Amino acid sequence: MVVGVVLDRHGEAYKVDVGSAATASLPILGFEGASKKNRPMLKRGDLVYARVVIANKDMDPELLCYSSRNKSDGFGPLTDGYMLKCSIRLANLLLQKECYIFQRLSGHFPFDVAIGHNGRVHIKTTKISQTIIVAQAILNSEYLSKTQQDKMVAMLTASIEE
C-alpha cells in the first residue's frame, strides 16, 4: 500500500510518484468498477491510495486501486486532506493494529488516515486545526514513550477543547 501523487496521464495509464527512483504506472481501469465510460478523472497533483502489484528492478512499479477481492477497500483517490511525509519506520509503526497515538487522538475528534509503506500519510479531518494536531502528533510520536505521547496529545488537544 502506498500513497502516490499523480504526475501525468499517458495513454491508458497514469504516471504516479510513489517516492521511489521510478514512477509507478496506474492503469485507468485500475479502479473498482472502472470502465471506459466510468472511471475516475484524475489530474496532476491528485493523491491516490493504491497497492503495488508489480515491483522489480527491471520494470516500473504497477499500482491498482482495488484489493485482491476486486473491492475498493479504502483504495482510490484521496480528496480533501493533507499529506505528510514521515520515515518508513514511523509508517510501519502507524500501520500496526493497535497504534497508540491513534487510540489517544480518536477520543478527541474523528479523523481518517491513509498510511503508505512509502512513508506518506494522508490525513482527513473536519477542521484544519484538527488536521494540524493529527499531523504534529504523528510526526512527534516516533520516539516518544506512551506516557510522553499522552502528555503530547493532552497539550495539543487542549487548545481545541477550550
Image (spheres, rainbow, N blue to C red):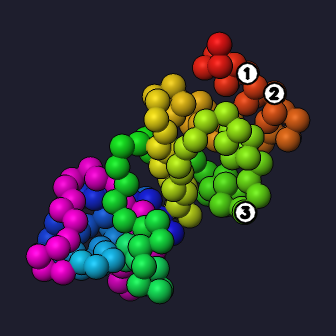
Q: Amino acid at mark 2?
A: Lys
- Residue type, mark 1 in image: Met
Percent x, y for residue 109? 61, 36
- At 48% from the left edge and 71% from the top edge, which residue is drawn? 73
Residue 132 lies left or right of residue 153; in this view the side is: left
Q: Circle 1 is placed at which residue position?
A: 155
Position of residue 4 in the picture relative to residue 40 (left or right): right
Q: Is residue 59 magenta?
A: yes
Front in this rendered view, residue 73 or 58: 73
The reply to whether residue 142 is in sight is: no
Q: Are marks 1 and 3 in contact (CB under 8 Å)?
A: no
According to the picture, the residue beneath numbered tag 2 turns out to be: 151
Q: Nearer the viewer, residue 79 or 119?
A: 79
Q: CA distance from mark 1 to mark 3?
A: 25 Å
Percent across and percent down for residue 134 are 59, 36
Which residue is drawn at the image coordinates 56% and 64% (left, top)? 117
Q: CA distance from mark 2 to mark 1?
A: 6 Å
Q: Amino acid at mark 3?
A: Lys
**Mark 1 secondary-structure assignment:** helix
Seen at 20% across and 71% down, the residue is 39
User: In the image shown, does 95 or 105 lie closer to the viewer?
Assistant: 105
In the rendered view, would you say 10 is above or below 133? below
Q: Is residue 46 visible?
A: yes
Give the residue pinned by disc 3.
97
Q: Tell me, for residue 139, which label it has, or none.
A: none
Q: Viewer-proximal residue, 33 or 3?
A: 33
Q: Which residues are magenta?
A: 35-63
Residues at marks 2 and 1 touching, judged by CB atoms closer than 8 Å? yes
Decide whether residue 83 is among the magenta residues.
Answer: no
Q: Furthest-top residue in view?
A: 162
- Spatial CA distance of label 3 from label 2 is 22 Å
